Amino acid sequence: MSSQTVKQRKCTTKTSAEIVSEARQSLRVQSTKRPFTPRDGHRHLFGEDTVRASHGNRPPSSFSLHAQNFDAPDSRPGSGTRLSPLEHPKLPEPCDTNSPFKAFPKPPTDPLEVKSRLAVSRGRFLRVETLVDGDAKEKLNPGHSQKQPSAKKVPGKDRTEVHIPRKPEQRGTASESTTMSSRFTDAQGAAAVAATSGTIQPGDDSADRPADRGSGQKTELERRGEAKSKEDVEAVAWKNRIAPLLQELESVAAGSSEGSVERLCELCEGLHRALARADLLGRSCKRRAAILRTLFRLVDLNSARLDLCIARLCLALRVSGNNLLNICKLVFQMSRNERNDGLFQENSIIETLLSVLTAEESEEALLYCVGALKFLSGNGAILRLLLDNNCMSVAQRLMGRLCSAEDARSAMAGHILVQLTTLLRNLADLPDSRPLFVSFSILPELCRVLRHHSDDQDICTNISRIYSKLSSYSECRHALARTPDCYRLFLELLNKHHQKQDLVVRLLFTLGNLTAKMDEARQQLFQCEGCTLTLLRLYDAYQRRRDPPLAAPAEADDVLVKLVRVLANMCIHRAVGPALASDHGCIQLLIETLELRSVQESEELMVNVAAALNNLSFYQAESAALRSSQLAIARLMLKLVFSSSMDTILEAVRVYGNLSQSKDVRDLIMEQKVHRFVVTLLDSKSSEMCFSACGVLTNLAMEPPNRARLELEGAAAKLVDCLKDLGAGDWQLAGQLCQALWNMIGTGTGNQLDTPDKEALLEILIIYLDEEEALDWIENEDMKDYHRACWELEFLPVAQKLLGTLQPLNA
């Protein structure tokens, strides 16, 4: 083959990033499929496979709601004004201390006496100003002494008050005070006088300190004025907008026609808007009870669209207690029917429901509210709405509250967490949610939930499903790996719930993901107390030797696939591998699996077992347990290497590549004619398959009798073809092919190659040994340094040695 021909084939050669990877090592990471989680076809508060199915105290999923179930007045509306606490009055001592009754003072019965006392009290009240000197008055009402006399309109009156300042030495008389007080005939007028004259209201705590109008603190008069103004606004809104809407609601509801439902929905939406514009949502509206009574009566019309409008408005009015619970149940009932999902998308109630989770303390109301959101999260469009409305943050805070509560392990807290973790499991399906799981620290918070509810299989299973989904992604995997003691927690759960297959398989899958990419995770898991014992005990339990078995054959195999993967990945750590390779129990369980299973029924399991044995066989020089079993393993590999599955064949050939360093294993390979099959694998045109086959042939060719038999199979010529077709740019494979050729012909007569094959091999080697030509095949500039190192360390030495052997023969 000419150099021009080789260069022309350069364009069709795979890029270096595709054909060279770190996976081509003696120690290989194993991958497997994520456990499948089927969707619950029926919307129940607890799924069909829940362990709560046999519990009689679980909350009901179905119930009937009518207007009579609601409390009409709800609760007393708030005034909207925060009042200062009153000092407790000191009561007079009873006349008779031995009497069990207190002797309270009696009010006067004569109306004239009451009126006379009122006049005297007003006189004394107004006379206070005349007894205060100018400086003191200025302190009581700073800035007032500098003001010019002004006319002030008394609120609610048509007359004008003229304030005449007095000199400090002037003394007011009772008649003057009485005359002035007679100009104001109500409490509001007296309050106005006090405000303008700088006097002090009885019972006002400002008597003990000067009024500071610049500090932003409101006087009692200002607060009362604001309350009065708000009442006036509310009265106007009620008269002009709200009352007519309520009247029409009742009128249309009484009609009971089919078209009335749509009109009722429109009226409810209009009422909601009117209350919002008047700032009367929440609990501040004084006529709130009347609104709620009207809304509750509409529940009996049994319309999902109308019920949703009612629920949204009632939640906006901040119903509480039994009414809040019934509203949450009403929403829960509607969410159980998938046909109502469109109504939830049209109505902006999702944000309102999330606000209930943020503020509500009633656990039963929380249960049905979260349950409704769980059902709705099965709809992809609503799932996106949940994410857009900050559902992750709400869920994180709710989990924190439930775990921090005094009774964090209560049954009701557990019921709520079952709903919440199912909701989070559905959110984990959205790619956009993964960064939020990390930024809101959801993964560590879920570990905290697991610690509090480790006995609750439903919660543990839901969280294991979340972890199995998210641990496949690097950012989530690293966040979970940084969670303190997560490995120990997983091992404890595997011990405690070893019989629950769906929980076990997901925890093992998560551990397999953590150990697949991070060397530190392999060591941390292995160093947990009882790690090896827990894994091997679990292995033995699902090995199909129990009667009755823990799980069906397919489910048991799924557990072992994930468990063996964890063992294979842990072996990659140079401190963990020798320890596992020396564990007789571990080696025997793997061998037993090969004996009990067939490739036809358990292909993935057989592949994973072969991969684990391949990784363990890397440490056979340090392990007496593995050395003593290597011949038995080699015999069991026969049914894998002669199977029809290319994945199974590839793993079996890799095992032979390590085990064929032993003469007993090489003799077995030749005796069972495995070498013929290995030679045919060179025709596969798969770089990975050729690389593994070359490892076996390199070891077999070390002995002259084996070389002769390989020559009869045409092994050397096939190796030259592989070097020509696959070697350019893949210097690891090219080096392995040259090593196999060196063992085949380097120390012999060279008769294993025909003259055309020798000439072709020489030409290829000359081209490949030119560094400039060799690196010209690498198109990825970022990988050139790596390939230069591979070319110099793995290809160049053996290729030069092989070329030196062929040139004298050719001469």
Image (cartoon, rainbow, N blue to C red):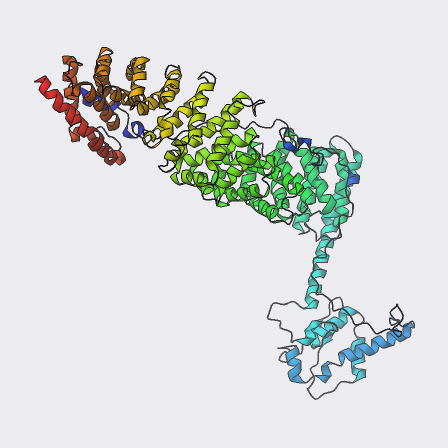
User: Left or right of 417: which side holds 78?
Assistant: right
Q: Which residue occupies the extreme left position in the image?
A: 811
Q: Is residue 48 visible?
A: yes
Please report the residue visible at 29 percent of the width from the left and 29 percent of the height from the top. Answer: 20
Q: Considering depth in this image, is 790 or 243 the residue closer to the camera?
A: 790
In this rendering, the count of numbered labels is 0
Q: Quadrant of residue 743?
A: top left
Q: Considering depth in this image, is 652 or 747 the residue closer to the camera?
A: 747
Please report the residue visible at 14 percent of the width from the left and 23 percent of the height from the top. Answer: 803
Residue 502 in the image: above or below residue 389: above
Q: Considering depth in this image, is 216 or 322 the residue closer to the camera?
A: 322
User: Left or right of 115: which side holds 125?
Assistant: left
Q: Position of residue 471 (x, y in %)?
A: 46, 36
Q: Position of residue 689 (x, y in %)?
A: 31, 21
Q: Position of residue 548 (x, y in %)?
A: 59, 22
Tell me the quarter of the image containing the N terminus: top left
Q: Quadrant of residue 523?
A: top left
Q: Is residue 244 visible?
A: no
Q: Quadrant of residue 518?
A: top left
Q: Position of residue 367 (x, y in %)?
A: 66, 40
Residue 179 in the image: above or below residue 662: below
Q: Considering depth in this image, is 78 or 508 the residue closer to the camera?
A: 508
Q: Which residue occupies the extreme right position in the image?
A: 110
Tell me the quarter of the image containing the C terminus: top left
Residue 423 in the image: above or below residue 660: below
Q: Which residue occupies the extreme bottom position in the image?
A: 169
